[in-house]
Image (cartoon, rainbow, N blue to C red):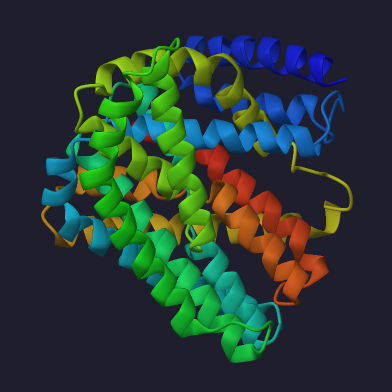
Amino acid sequence: MLFFELLIILISTKLAGDLSVRLGQPSVLGKLLVGILIGPAVLGWIDNSHTIKELSEIGVLLLMFLAGLETDINELNKNRRSSFAVAIGGIILPMVGGYLAGKVLGISDTSALFIGLLLSATSVSITVQTLRDMGKLKTKESVTILGAAIVDDVLVVVLLAFLMSFVGAGDVSLGLVIGKKIAFFLIAILLGWKVVPWLMRWLVTLRVTQMVISTGLIICFGFAFLSEEMGVAGIIGAFIAGVAISQTPYKHEVEQKLEPIAYAVFVPVFFVSIGLSVSFTGLGDQIGLILGLTVLAVATKLVGSGLGARLTGFNLRSSFGIGTGMISRGEVALIIASLGLERGLLAQEFYTSTIIVVILTTLLTPPLLKKVF
């Protein structure tokens, strides 16, 4: 069954991506939409199985690893002030907007805060691919978006831990959560600075085939594992691994050999997996809620992050582009929603609607970026 699913995924994503480009949109939009078409929501050819989830997770890690390889660390450092401002603006407005929306829906303060926190999340994996398609991944705006995504991820997880600790949803130590994140970044910076160059030089001397790309993948998955163990999203670890290797002489060889591996199988599975979460069952009565939350999700992130960019020196068009790049909630928000349902912070009646909102923000990001850039 897996071979049939991979066959369908590869054929459909390539055809849908080509059609999307012919219609003047980034190829990633077609790949996202075809996931809904071939998934349980419409044709039912592909199930959201454990194997598909695992393959898609590898896909998003490789996508962010490639983004790290293409990132200029000097530009990332120069734009750190803007990245912090974009991240903070993109958390405050969605948090407030989500909380107010929750109160309008008549839910408790805790659940309303959780919805605000959910809308504050950002996942830039789709943004990365869209900008890559357009040849804009190395611009100042893109570097700022990537930096802001790292800050956003850390702050949202810390706020989630604080909320869970405050309401007693599980045995959560806020101090431990913050400490682990600080420790992760200190360890990651030290490893990237001192250990990664040495490890690359040593491992590539082994007399076996393809040791350069193998070493790159070892470092990528090692950093992803470390980041998840320390409570940070695996995609952040993969991105940092890519940045670390980009400072070595092996950057171009790793990038050239990784792209065929990533884009032949794993990345297409990741794009399709996002659409597999969609279900249209019982949504007739919640259309208004879904549309309202989607507009709120897009507007608050666009204005909040865009304002952060504007206040740190970007012109109006660039600020709008940066705000647009932060709209996609992607897999990060899906994980938070699942956790909220499990811990009783998100009611079952709102879970499906919330998932649809996350998917819609992800689908809207590529055409909006295309329009801006």
Residue at screen point 39% across, 72% down: 92
Q: Is residue 248 visible?
A: yes
Does 32 sit left or right of 77 as displayed?
right
Question: How many numbered discs, if any?
Answer: 0
Q: Nearer the viewer, residue 272 or 298?
A: 272
Give coordinates of residue 327: x percent, y percent. 45, 50
Residue at screen point 68% across, 59% down: 354
Give coordinates of residue 332: x percent, y percent. 55, 53
Residue at screen point 50% across, 9% down: 22
Q: Is residue 367 visible?
A: no
Choose top left, top right, bottom left or bottom right for residue 100: bottom right
Q: Nearer the viewer, residue 234 or 367?
A: 234
Q: Dividing the image into 4 quarters, which one contains the N terminus?
A: top right
Q: Nearer the viewer, residue 234 or 346?
A: 234
Residue at screen point 45% across, 29% down: 217
In this view, 342 is above or below 338 = below
In this view, 115 is above or below 322 = below
Does 124 sit left or right of 252 as displayed?
right
In this view, 270 is above or below 98 = above
Give coordinates of residue 2: x percent, y percent. 82, 21
Q: Residue furthest front?
A: 207
Choose top left, top right, bottom left or bottom right for residue 168: bottom right
In this view, 110 is above or below 315 = below
Give coordinates of residue 201: x percent, y percent. 26, 27
Q: Dividing the image into 4 quarters, which one contains the C terminus?
A: top left
Does 35 sit left or right of 292 as displayed?
right
Choose top left, top right, bottom left or bottom right for residue 57: top right
